[in-house]
Image (tube, rainbow, N blue to C red):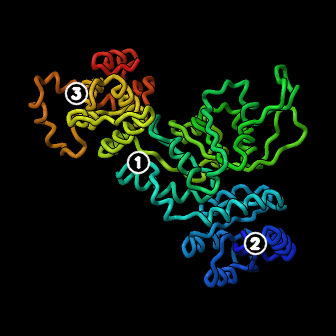
Amino acid sequence: MSTARALVIDDEPDILELLEITLGRMGIATDQAGDVQQAKALLAENNYQLCLTDMRLPDGNGLEVVHYIQHQCPQTPVAVITAHGCIDTAIESMKAGAFDFISKPVDLATLRKIVTTAIESSQLSAEEASDNPLIIGNAPAIESLNQSIRKLARSQAPVYISGESGSGKELVARSIHQFGPRAHKPFVAVNCGAIPRELMESEFFGHKKGSFTGAHQDKAGLFQQAEGGTLFFDEVADLPLDMQVKLLRAIQEKAIRPIGAQEEIRTDVRVLCATHKALEKEVDAGRFRQDLFYRLNVIQINVPPLRDRQDDIPMLARHLLERLASGINVPSPTLSTRALEVLAQYHFPGNVRELENILERAFTLCDSQEIDEADLHINTRQMTPLQPSEPASQSAEHWRNYASLDDYLADIERDILCKTLDQTQWNKTMAAKELGISFRSLRYRLQKLGLDQE
């Protein structure tokens, strides 16, 4: 850090002096500005590895500085200093592009951690990151997703990753961690729906020896395990309401209290979360706290389902087969033309995870170096009857490609059922309600059409 330089913006001499002394002891030189205009002038003339700005300034506010840096020097991380308890202001600043925030009175240990992470972020090579594959695919939605990952990797803002089951939400979270300044620290992933309710508080925050029956020794919680790194809450919508309150406090205060402990412990983790459910609807239904949603949803990105990027399937399939083959040190098999056609027309309700399972089964059972249609064990009746690019006007005559009108109507029914089930993440009760039929009727139709996954 000996060559690092920071810009500190504040109109309070005591704060300026405190920040200058603290950064100076870390080997960071500082320039000072007392207002927005002076700060813009210094930013235009110098290159900084970090900017710290107060939110309230004589001629404006810190958000103006954040917006200016985002447009003029986006490689410079900026942290905003806010009044204690002004979490809304902190969230607004991170939505605008701030790296992180610090609450007054400034905690020096927290400040040093933020400064260290920010300096490391500014030194990341954008060229090196762009040369590495993140999410495999050439579809426009994937290219946009990869750009978002590279940008978000440099921030410390919480990210809400939405998408269907099996679409790769955890892979996105790992990529954000891998290409950011916390990459050398732990990445801890937890499935919120897999932890028994009575053990949640202990798992999240840890406990002290003797704090309850069975607590024979101290236990570090997930926040402590992820210290300095990233904590990924998968299926966060499955958290019970009482646990949501405790999680909200831990994120806002950047501190936890293990069960049985007398004092809180400061934490330094970046929080990412994901769920296949529509979190906004969970809030509307009263199953998820609005304040926690607001805190987690600082930035939202969506992972597209596999059916929306079917052109990527051959590339994905080759990559998955190569990974399977390298795991046991054997040559990677190829896919026949017909096998690729079947994969391209399949709905993939389980998304990339289902593709991986199909290929792993075929790789294990195939007797040759070429995987054919029969090796995939895909029910061809679940394949898409019409390609999305096919004009709707052709559908009226499309039945002539079928053996009978009944077969054609069955395919139309199958397509409607699959689309509705995809929209409800294969929640059959919700799908039946959307279709206006009984649950029993839906099950009968699924069994008749070979779509029942049970």
Q: Would residue 223 be found to the left or right of residue 424 on screen?
A: right
Kind of element beneath mark 1: loop
Foreground: 442 or 37?
A: 37
User: Crowdedness of circle 3 by 10 Å Cα count: few (<14), some, many (20+)?
Assistant: many
In the figure, residue 309 lies in which quadrant?
top left
Query: How many numbered tags mark residues here?
Result: 3
Compared with 118, 230 (above or below) is above
Q: Which residue is mark 3?
A: 411
Residue 98 in the image, given as x and y percentages of width and height: 64, 63
- Disc 2 to disc 1, how far (Cα)? 39 Å
User: Crowdedness of circle 2 by 10 Å Cα count: few (<14), some, many (20+)?
Assistant: many
Q: Which residue type does callout 2 highlight?
A: Ile
User: Crowdedness of circle 1 by 10 Å Cα count: few (<14), some, many (20+)?
Assistant: some
Q: Which residue is mark 2?
A: 28
Foreground: 38 or 181?
A: 181
Q: Would residue 284 be found to the left or right of residue 16 on screen?
A: left
Residue 168 in the image, given as x and y percentages of width and height: 47, 40
Are the two marked residues, 2 and 1, in contact with CB atoms closer than 8 angstroms? no
Q: Which residue is mark 1?
A: 136
Kind of element beneath mark 2: loop
- Disc 2 to disc 3, how far (Cα)? 67 Å
